[in-house]
């Protein structure tokens, strides 16, 4: 799908077609006249193959297939031009036309022959395009907020809990078993793996107050030994919930949170 836009530069009408990717293609005939070339063919022979092409263009005589050039081709044509206004033409394109097209999907500067009503109509079309795009972005953002709300609310409830809970219990609270949460935290370099510090948090996360290591004595063949167990604090639960949401591992559904993508 293409969109034809007409623009006026110092009395010259420049037609631009935006392709399905939003990239501008300039009608070669119009550019060649504005830049003082003998004709479009004389201008395009200096361009590389990928800098030119053809597009169907609506004209008073019906739709015609016309030669067009892309943005790099336009700059090359400007460099080869010998007229004094070529630099002004390039400034007009780069400073006014292209930013307007890329920001709004259109261009609203009126041509000299445009009636005020036509200029206003063009402005309204561009404005409606912006409104439609912003509405879509807002709807997507609201969906994300609504989807994440249960998990965020859960994190807020535990934020002030400094005693902490076992990681396994935290995993159950968000609908994900401990057999999966530990490998994930190893992968994310939050918990250490192997050796006598297996499943203990890295020091930086202890320093931030996200975890606590609790000593638990136990009897082994009549000998008292100490095991170290990782607890995640309220602050840590809030941080970890947000981290997993941001990384896409945690998905909030209608009334619960679950981890996925493991």
Image (cartoon, grey):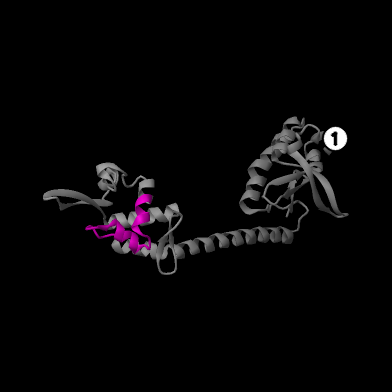
Please report the bounds of the magenta region as a residue range: 159-183
User: Horizontally, is 38 left or right of 177 in the view?
Assistant: right
161 or 215, which is in the foreground? 215
> How many C-alpha atoms fall within 10 Å of the one at disc 1: few (<14), some, or many (≥20)?
few
Callout 1 secondary element: loop
Residue 73: % across, % down:
73, 37
| In the image, residue 63 lies in the stretch drawn in magenta | no
State the image quarter where residue 119 is shown: bottom right
- For image coordinates 55% across by 59% down, the residue present is 137
Tell me: residue 89, above or below residue 164.
above
Q: Nearer the viewer, residue 168 or 129?
A: 168
Q: Which residue does the numbered mark 1 point to in the structure image?
A: 38
* Residue at x 76% of width, y 36% of height: 49
In this rendering, would 228 be left or right of 99?
A: left
Residue 43 left/right relative to 247: right
Q: Kindly give the residue lying farthest to the right in the view shown.
A: 61
Image vertical order of residue 104 relative to residue 82, above or below = below
Q: Which residue is depicted at the point 50% across and 60% down?
A: 141
Choose between 191 and 119: the one closer to the eye.
191
């Amino acid at each position: 799908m293409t969109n034809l836009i007409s623009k006026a530069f110092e009395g010259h009408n420049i037609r631009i077609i935006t392709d399905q990717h939003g990239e501008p293609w300039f009608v070669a005939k119009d550019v060649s006249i504005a830049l003082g070339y003998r004709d479009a063919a004389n201008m395009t022979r200096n361009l590389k193959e990928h800098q030119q092409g053809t597009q169907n263009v609506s004209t008073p005589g019906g739709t015609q297939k016309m030669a067009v050039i892309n943005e790099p081709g336009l700059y090359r044509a400007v460099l080869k031009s010998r007229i004094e206004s070529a630099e002004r033409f390039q400034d007009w394109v780069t400073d006014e036309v292209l930013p307007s097209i890329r920001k709004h999907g259109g261009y609203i500067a009126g041509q000299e022959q445009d009636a005020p009503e036509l200029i206003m109509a063009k402005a309204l079309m561009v404005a409606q395009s912006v409104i439609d795009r912003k509405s879509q972005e807002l709807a997507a953002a609201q969906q994300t907020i609504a989807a994440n709300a249960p998990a965020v609310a859960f994190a807020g409830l535990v934020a002030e809990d400094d005693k902490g809970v076992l990681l396994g219990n935290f995993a159950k609270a968000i609908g994900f078993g401990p057999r999966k949460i530990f490998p994930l935290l190893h992968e994310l370099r939050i918990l250490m793996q192997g050796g006598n510090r297996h499943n203990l948090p890295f020091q930086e996360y202890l320093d931030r107050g996200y975890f606590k290591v609790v000593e638990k004595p136990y009897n082994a063949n009549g000998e008292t030994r100490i095991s170290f167990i990782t607890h995640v604090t309220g602050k840590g639960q809030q941080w970890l919930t947000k981290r997993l949401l941001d990384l896409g591992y945690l998905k909030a559904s209608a009334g619960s949170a679950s981890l996925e993508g493991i």
